[in-house]
Image (cartoon, rainbow, N blue to C red):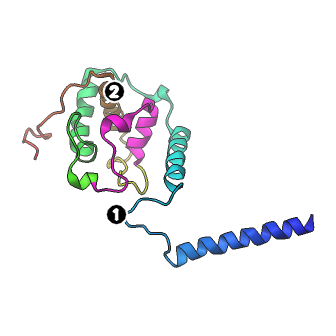
């Protein structure tokens, strides 16, 4: 038994030294031009999915996501805050966005099979090391729910077109 504990301790120490070497010597390539080593993407994506599901708010806190006014408000927020990376429905992302690593998924793919409360958590909190920022106005869950209402309507095919004017009526670039 003592020999097994010593062996496990030695393996743990070797693992710790290996990890310290990777971090301390910069052995892991963090370039945005290369992908992750095999298995790393799976670990990160699985962690992401499980983390969102653990931390998402209750659907009891959600407003009526089918409210047309809420969907319209969410479409405006999406057009200015989300479309630059995830594109407008039916359009493609810019070359710059397609060059990101990881590439921001098209919105239809990004919303996938997420429940509305999961989408709320993602939009509100963003995702570390993915380029997706947290919602810029802290403690504005009402704005986040509006975006979620738009995303749900988009998935259901009832979203309509995105607005083409900014908040004061001026045309957006």
Judging from the image, what secondary structure is the residue with disc 2 in?
Answer: helix
Nearer to the camera, 149 or 86: 86
Specify few, some or many for label 1: CA neighbours under 10 Å numbering under 14, 14-19, or 20 or more: few
Q: Is residue 36 above or below residue 89?
A: below
Taking the view exactly as shown, the residue that stands out farthest to the front is 38
Q: Position of residue 158 (x, y in %)?
A: 27, 21
Residue under pointer 2:
155
- At x 43%, y 55%, the residue is 128
State yes or no: residue 27 in magenta. Answer: no
The residue that label 1 is drawn on is 33
Identified at 32% across, 34% down, the residue is 108
The extreme left residue here reads 170
Q: How many marks?
A: 2
x 37%, y 39%: residue:
110
Mark 2 Cα shell of 10 Å, populated few (<14), some (14-19), many (≥20): some
71, above or below 57, in the image: above
CA gap, disc 1 and disc 2? 32 Å
Report the quarter where the N terminus lies: bottom right
In the picture provided, is 32 more to the left or to the right than 60?
left
Q: Quadrant of residue 66?
A: top left
Residue 7: horizontal and vertical position, in percent?
82, 69
Q: Is residue 109 magenta?
A: yes
Where residue 101 sits in the image (x, y, percent)? Answer: 36, 56
Comparing 156 with 163, the one in front is: 156
Q: Secondary structure at mark 1?
A: loop
**Bounds of the magenta segment:** 99-126
Name the outermost residue toward the bottom.
25
Lateral position of residue 50 relative to residue 102, left or right = right
- Tags 1 and 2 touching, CB below 8 Å: no
């Amino acid at each position: 038994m003592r020999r097994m504990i010593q062996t496990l301790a030695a393996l743990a120490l070797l693992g710790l030294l290996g990890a310290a070497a990777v971090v301390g010597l910069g052995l892991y390539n963090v370039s945005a031009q290369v992908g992750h080593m095999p298995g790393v993407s799976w670990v990160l994506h699985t962690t992401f999915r499980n983390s969102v599901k653990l931390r998402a708010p209750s659907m009891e806190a959600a407003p009526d996501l089918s409210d047309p006014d809420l969907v319209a408000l969410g479409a405006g927020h999406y057009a200015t805050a989300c479309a630059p990376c995830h594109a407008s429905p039916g359009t493609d992302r810019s070359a710059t966005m397609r060059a990101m690593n990881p590439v921001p998924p098209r919105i239809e793919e990004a919303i996938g099979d997420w429940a509305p409360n999961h989408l709320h958590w993602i939009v509100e909190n963003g995702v570390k090391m993915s380029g997706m920022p947290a919602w810029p106005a802290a403690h504005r869950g009402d704005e986040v729910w509006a975006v979620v209402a738009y995303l749900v309507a988009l998935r259901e095919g009832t979203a309509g077109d995105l607005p083409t004017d900014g908040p004061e009526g001026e045309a957006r670039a």
